[in-house]
Image (cartoon, rainbow, N blue to C red):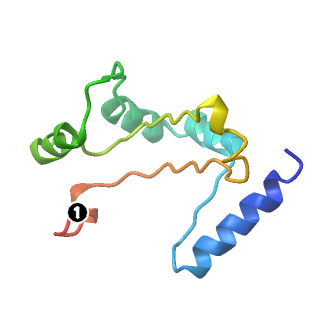
């Protein structure tokens, strides 16, 4: 944990040097914004759906969901590293991104 701030700074600098705009916020700041801003709560209520894990998802079913509009707007993804690979990937810190993307933000390629 002691290297986490430095690792985060290094990754942020790398992404910025690659031309990406990086916006960071600490969890406590997000929770504070969320509790004080009713608009955030309303957006989350309208967009965030609790979906039971579907183990039968595959590439085609995801693409079909995007094409029908069923899978657009909010993505909650929990990624688990198997125990036997944790040491191998220990140098990679988690990346958290919260962003609201509408259809107008997506180009014709998407």
Residue pushed farthest front? 84
Quarter residue 49 falls in: top left
Give the number of callouts. Answer: 1
Residue 36: image x %, image y %? 59, 37
> Which residue corresponds to mark 1?
104
Q: Secondary structure at mark 1?
A: helix
Quarter residue 58 falls in: top left
Residue pushed farthest left? 68
110 relative to 38 in the view: left or right: left
The quadrant the N terminus occupies is top right
Q: Residue at x 56, y 38 (%)?
A: 34
The quadrant the C terminus occupies is bottom left
Q: Residue at x 38, y 41 (%)?
A: 75
Q: Nearer the viewer, residue 3 or 23?
A: 3
Residue pushed farthest top? 52
Residue 76: image x %, image y %? 43, 36
Q: Residue at x 63, y 47 (%)?
A: 94
Residue 107: image x %, image y %? 22, 69
Q: Is residue 55 visible?
A: yes
Q: Is residue 70 visible?
A: no
Q: Nearer the viewer, residue 90 or 88?
A: 88
Q: Nearer the viewer, residue 3 or 50?
A: 3
- The vertical placement of 10 against 26, above or below, is below
- The vertical placement of 54 against 110, above or below, is above
Q: Nearer the viewer, residue 27 or 38?
A: 27
Quarter residue 31 falls in: top right
- The vertical placement of 82 against 50, above or below, is below
Q: Tell me if mark 1 has few (under 14), some (14-19) or many (20+) residues whose alpha carbon lies within 10 angstroms of its own.
A: few
Q: Residue at x 58, y 62 (%)?
A: 23
């Amino acid at each position: 944990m002691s290297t986490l701030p430095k690792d985060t700074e290094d990754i942020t600098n790398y992404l910025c040097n690659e031309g990406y705009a990086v916006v960071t916020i600490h969890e406590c700041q997000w929770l504070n914004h969320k509790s004080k801003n009713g608009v955030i709560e309303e957006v989350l209520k309208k967009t965030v759906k609790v979906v039971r894990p579907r183990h039968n998802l595959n590439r085609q079913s995801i693409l079909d969901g995007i094409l029908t509009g069923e899978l657009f707007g909010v993505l909650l993804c929990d990624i688990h590293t198997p125990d036997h690979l944790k040491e191998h990937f220990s140098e990679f810190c988690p990346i958290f991104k919260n962003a609201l993307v509408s259809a107008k933000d997506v180009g014709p390629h998407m």
